Image (cartoon, rainbow, N blue to C red):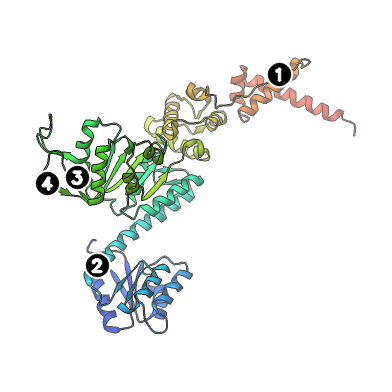
Amino acid sequence: MSPTTSERILIVEDEPSTRVGLTELVRTWGFTADSAGDGEEALQRITVFRPSIIISDLVMPRRDGLELLRALKDDGSDYTVVILTAQGTVETAVEAMKEGAYDYLTKPIEPQRLKILLDKIVERQDTLREVKVLRKQLREHGTYGKMIGSSPQMRKVYQVIEQAAPTSASVLISGESGTGKELVAQTIHQLSPRAQMPFVPINCAAIPETLLESEIFGHEKGSFTGAVDRRAGCFELADHGTLFLDEIAEMTPSTQVKLLRVLQERRFRRLGGRNEETVDVRVIAATNVNPADAVKNGKLREDLFYRLNVFAIELPPLRQRKEDLPLLVQSFLADFNSRNNKKVSALDQAAMRILEQYNWPGNIRELRNVIERAVILSSGEFIDPKLLPPLVTESPDVVKPTLSLTPGTTVEEAETRLILMTLEHTRDNKTRAAEILGISLKTLHNKLNKLRGRGKREEESVPQ
């Protein structure tokens, strides 16, 4: 923690010398501090001093620490509370933690333990503040950091991210290719206390089996043909940060065993090395297959699966969250407009309907590519179906309107039905409807005026 901090701490202690001593101690660590003699006074001081952290004794007159904690909880306030307790009241301190206290310390207080605890709380406060910003962003814009979507499925993903981020626990992300697994890993890293340290991604499927172990653990000079120098592996590069292992099920069983050992012992040996190195790395892994199936099929060791699966995040495919399509499309349009100096404002109704019907086997990555292509090819303000790739427009998923005629239908009736059906397909986009029908916009307007005139005459002929 830096010598100065914006965190404000309220010391609540009925014993004067302890209260003064603790207040002065935390001030020397750079905190802004104030004090209160009991829980009742603390509630009064809170409204003026507005602390983010409260260190409270458990046993006090008028209102004790447990009653203070309940009052703060009832008020809906968001404070981090540390309870101070004597040895005989540890059970009550545990009860206080059930009521929402962050932690407790036994008296007499060891300054170093208190300092370590406050450092952890400061990191937690930073994460909580970032989460609040992201939640506001989600409410107002439907985005969560760089992640886009406000569907119920994505809100569940954000909830697990918030739970996992402040910890150092391993995370296993599963989801089809193109769903954004690395983006989830980056978001967890950015919300964690490790955010200022390296985020090191590696795709286990993209590296030859013979080189993967060297990439992960590093190697010593001369450890194999071509090893002309000692090289640091991903664990060393990610020390104190986060290592993202994509497509973990593609890792060989022997490498999985070594990975499991590092996760358990926080120690590893470079390829060809004799000495063990100690690292502090948070591991996030991902797979595009069902993890349970990967274990069953022998692609993922069961013991490694349980070690990685402390937090599990399953990303939904795009076809299951199509309500997020408009947000994704607008975000990609803004991105590619900027990159290509274009001014595309939206997709027209017909093009958007095609995207909504398409099944998206390549998920968000495929959608991004489709929008990039359309923006580059566009020459106007709107993207119409002609700018979408045939793979999308000709997909069996995309339902095309059909016109069925029966014997006895007049040419005039058939034309009327064709015009109305085409307008419905284009969501009343007359310019696009005229293009589809192969007539000019003026001709279409003339035909529509004729239809309206005919409809009005029919209404007037109805007996009153």
Q: Within 10 angstroms of label 4, few (less than 14), some, or many (20 or more) residues?
A: few
Q: Nearer the viewer, residue 277 or 294?
A: 294
Q: Badge 2 is on which residue? A: 115
Confirm or deny contact between disc 4 and disc 2 (CB under 8 A): no
Confirm or deny contact between disc 2 and disc 3 (CB under 8 A): no
Q: Check disc 1 and give the amino acid type.
A: Glu
Q: Badge 3 is on which residue? A: 236
Could you say where residue 78 lies in the image, as x and y percent from the top left? Answer: 42, 65
Q: Badge 4 is on which residue? A: 275
Closer to us: mark 2 or mark 3?
3
Task: For marks 2 and 3, give the CA distance.
Answer: 28 Å
> Please, what secondary structure does the residue beneath circle 2 have?
helix
**Rendered image quadrant of residue 66:** bottom left
Q: Badge 1 is on which residue? A: 415
Q: Residue furthest right?
A: 463
Confirm or deny contact between disc 3 and disc 4 (CB under 8 A): no
Q: Earlier in the sequence, mark 3 or mark 1?
A: 3
> Please, what secondary structure does the residue beneath circle 3 have?
helix
Name the quarter where the N terminus is drawn. bottom left
